[in-house]
Image (cartoon, helix red, strand yellow):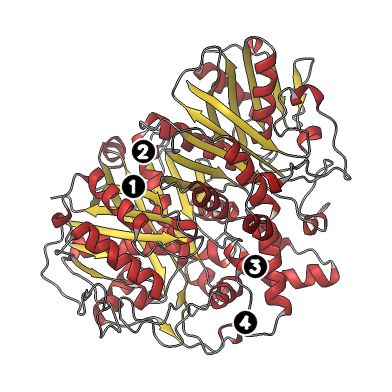
């Protein structure tokens, strides 16, 4: 059992420092934007000036999960990384004929700038990993975090982030096909072996990249492995899965928007819902990408 | 639990396979040179002088992908040659990359910005796609696939990740390493940092001026004992130590005292249960930037005190291949053990004043190499060390 000791998200929902936000979710449209706190109160001036939105929201949510001890590991999942700085530097090299280019966007374009900035800010010298496997980046980061806890670490920061840039809109209806608005979000949480009474745990997480396996069969075998019947589950969160419907199910994409790290925010929603509503299990089904499935089981003990 | 190595493959500017790479190392023949490609101007790079089409046909590749994916397919195929897929062996692929499909993206980006033309090339952009393409070429589609992106330590971290998943009984066998192709994006990026040497790079030399960029891919196959019983593969070497630590000093620069490098080397030694004097050869990160080589030298002296082992940076041959370097250099480490050799550090003449360390200057046979330590350090202060050991 892996206990969530603190969790924080910045998204298009009112998720930041807002206990009970899962009861006030609203359907997003193309006009919705990131609900950000006043970064001036949180980040130093140099960070405010230099960091792109994905770095600001990741750093801010990661800092919310701090505790008195140094993290034993920092694990990040991101599908597309720091897109704004990537686009910025692509534009710089496209338009500039100068011998001298500004390196800032390049430096901050690598995927592990997220984890790197967190370690820099916290002066953390521990394991620092960045996983990027399309829409399963969060689940794979979570598998790494759990593996680290099994290996004897006890204070792991894990999360995922992806950002929307305007350029992505140009790829809609061709490369990107989705009826949901594109969004930015970051969710981080502190995962520990240490028990909390009536605490909320990540019970298990798994991924599938096997194109011959059906989602229904995959869910069945995952539940069987965990000794759980489908009807024991309080609620199923899914990303627009045709065959999951009924009153105890929720398609989370209208609330998270299309974002390859959406299942990380869904994890926070589930945490928030469980922390206000007694005991039980929530299953998060991430089926954003065709044959790639991620399953996360969250339980309030 | 022991982690056995049962295969390796590499492609770089000094050879299209591990035999060619070894031969170039032996002949002290660098792959770094000027090109006629206007992108690189007067700068020297370690480029593989075949187009994507030429490589695809030469290696009979069936899968289309970015150049990053193509290089990865070639090296991963060499590593996995002679291995057989078997449903009783849970096999995975963990690949490191920093640029992913950027080589394709940057070719079609202007058309998108200026004329709104959407190219299918964007489908290959995400780093995770390059790993899926490599897996597809290997027939590994139905397994665990993951991509690590921690800049220049990506491949070393992918190796570490694979070993940990075997130890934790998630996988029995895993192909691990990394791949990166030369792109205008990374070339211009490193130029903007002003850390290129216009001449051949001189790792660990007092007068070093910076790095030469390179491209390539390197993979190794890791197996558990249980996997060996089924695959009947003869192990070649063992992966005995690994560690990832953070320097937490600066986004791109290493701390002057090499704090993160000391942590990762000491962590890997501790895990391998080795004393510093049991390391027979170090394949250094050694990018040839003023900052890295001093920081890494200081870290060597802190870990190994007065007995710094034979060390060299093979980036003087291949150039800095970024996310691929830890994979390529893992293959070099294996060949150091198998052949009892140490590799020279090309272009060195003068010791760094502060540390007074001389790297290995000649290709030398007749060494008994039990343990090789290999460093890979990346942006974000990401310091990783792996240790590869002989079976003896």
Whole-Å distance between the Cαs marked 1 and 2?
A: 8 Å
Q: Residue at x 43, y 58 (%)?
A: B153
Q: Residue at x 38, y 75 (%)?
A: B288
Q: Which mark is residue B222?
A: 1
Whole-Å distance between the Cαs marked 4 and 1?
A: 44 Å
Protein chain holding label 3: B
Q: Which mark is residue A100?
A: 4
Whole-Å distance between the Cαs marked 3 and 2?
A: 34 Å
Check contact, mark 1 vs mark 2: CB within 8 A.
yes
Q: Which x, y percent locates residue A252?
A: 75, 30
Q: Residue at x 63, y 45 (%)?
A: A58
Give the residue number, with chain letter if any, for mark 2. B166
Give the residue number, with chain letter if any, for mark 3. B104
Protein chain holding label 1: B
Characterize the local packing of mark 4: few (<14), some (14-19) or many (20 or more) Cα atoms within 10 angstroms. few
- Can residue B376 be seen here? yes
Protein chain holding label 4: A
Give the answer, above or below, for where A238 lies relative to A107: above
Characterize the local packing of mark 3: few (<14), some (14-19) or many (20 or more) Cα atoms within 10 angstroms. many
Q: Quadrant of residue B356?
A: bottom left
């Amino acid at each position: 059992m892996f206990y969530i000791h603190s969790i924080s998200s910045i998204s298009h929902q009112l998720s930041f420092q807002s206990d009970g936000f899962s009861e006030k979710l609203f359907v997003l449209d193309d006009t919705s934007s990131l609900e950000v706190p006043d970064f001036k109160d949180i980040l130093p001036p140099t960070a405010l000036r230099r960091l792109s939105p994905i770095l600001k929201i990741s750093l801010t949510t990661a800092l919310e999960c701090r505790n008195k001890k140094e993290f034993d590991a920092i694990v990040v999942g991101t599908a597309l990384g720091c897109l704004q700085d990537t686009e910025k530097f692509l534009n710089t090299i496209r338009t500039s004929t100068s011998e001298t280019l500004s390196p800032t966007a390049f430096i901050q374009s690598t995927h592990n700038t997220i984890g790197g900035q967190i370690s820099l800010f916290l002066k953390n010298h521990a394991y620092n990993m960045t996983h990027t496997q399309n829409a399963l980046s969060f689940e794979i980061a979570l598998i790494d975090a759990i593996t680290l806890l099994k290996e004897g670490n006890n204070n792991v920061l894990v999360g995922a982030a992806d950002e929307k840039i305007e350029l992505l809109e140009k790829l809609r209806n061709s490369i990107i096909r989705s009826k949901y608005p594109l969004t930015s979000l970051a969710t981080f949480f502190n995962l520990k072996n240490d028990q909390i009474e009536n605490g909320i745990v990540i019970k298990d997480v798994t991924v599938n990249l096997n194109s011959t396996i059906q989602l229904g069969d995959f869910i069945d075998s995952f539940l069987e492995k965990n000794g759980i019947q489908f009807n024991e589950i309080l609620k199923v969160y899914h990303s627009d899965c045709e065959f999951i419907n009924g009153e105890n199910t929720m398609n989370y994409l209208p609330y998270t928007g299309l974002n390859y790290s959406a299942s990380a925010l869904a994890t926070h929603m589930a945490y928030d819902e469980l922390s206000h509503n007694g005991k039980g299990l929530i299953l998060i089904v991430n089926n954003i990408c065709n044959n790639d499935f991620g399953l996360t089981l969250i339980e309030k003990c | 639990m022991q982690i056995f190595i049962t295969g390796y493959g590499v492609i770089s500017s000094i050879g299209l396979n591990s035999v060619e790479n070894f031969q170039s190392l032996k002949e002290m023949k660098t792959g770094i040179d000027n090109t006629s490609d206007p992108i690189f101007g007067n700068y020297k790079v370690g480029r593989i002088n075949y187009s994507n089409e030429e490589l695809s046909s030469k290696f009979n590749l069936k899968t289309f992908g970015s150049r990053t994916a193509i290089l990865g397919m070639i090296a991963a195929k060499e590593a996995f040659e002679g291995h057989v897929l078997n449903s009783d062996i849970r096999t995975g692929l963990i690949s490191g990359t920093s640029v992913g499909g950027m080589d394709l993206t940057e070719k079609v980006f202007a058309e998108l910005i200026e004329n709104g033309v959407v190219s299918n090339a964007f489908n290959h952009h995400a780093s995770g796609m390059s790993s899926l393409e490599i897996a597809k070429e290997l027939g590994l589609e139905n397994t665990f696939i993951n991509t690590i992106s921690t800049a220049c330590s990506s491949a070393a971290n992918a190796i570490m990740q694979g070993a940990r998943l075997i130890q934790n009984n998630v996988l029995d066998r895993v192909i691990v390493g990394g791949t990166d192709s030369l792109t205008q994006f990374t070339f211009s990026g490193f130029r903007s940092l002003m850390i290129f040497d216009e001449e051949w790079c001189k790792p660990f030399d007092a007068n070093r001026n910076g790095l030469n960029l390179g491209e390539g891919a390197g993979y190794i196959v890791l197996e558990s004992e249980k996997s060996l019983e089924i695959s009947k593969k003869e192990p070649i070497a063992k992966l005995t130590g690994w560690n990832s630590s953070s320097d937490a000093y600066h986004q791109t620069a290493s701390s002057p005292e090499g704090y993160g490098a000391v942590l990762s080397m000491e962590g890997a030694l501790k895990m391998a249960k080795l004393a510093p004097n049991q390391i027979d050869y170090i394949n250094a990160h050694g990018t040839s930037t003023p900052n890295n080589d001093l920081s890494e030298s200081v870290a060597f002296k802190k870990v190994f005190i007065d007995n710094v082992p034979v060390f060299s940076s093979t980036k003087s041959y291949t150039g800095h291949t970024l996310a691929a370097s830890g994979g390529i250099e893992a293959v070099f480490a294996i060949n150091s053990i198998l052949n009892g050799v140490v590799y020279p550090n090309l272009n060195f003449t003068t010791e760094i004043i502060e540390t007074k360390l001389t790297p290995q200057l000649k290709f030398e046979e007749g060494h008994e190499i039990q343990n090789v330590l290999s460093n890979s350090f990346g942006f974000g202060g990401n310091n990783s060390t792996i240790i590869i050991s002989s079976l003896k």
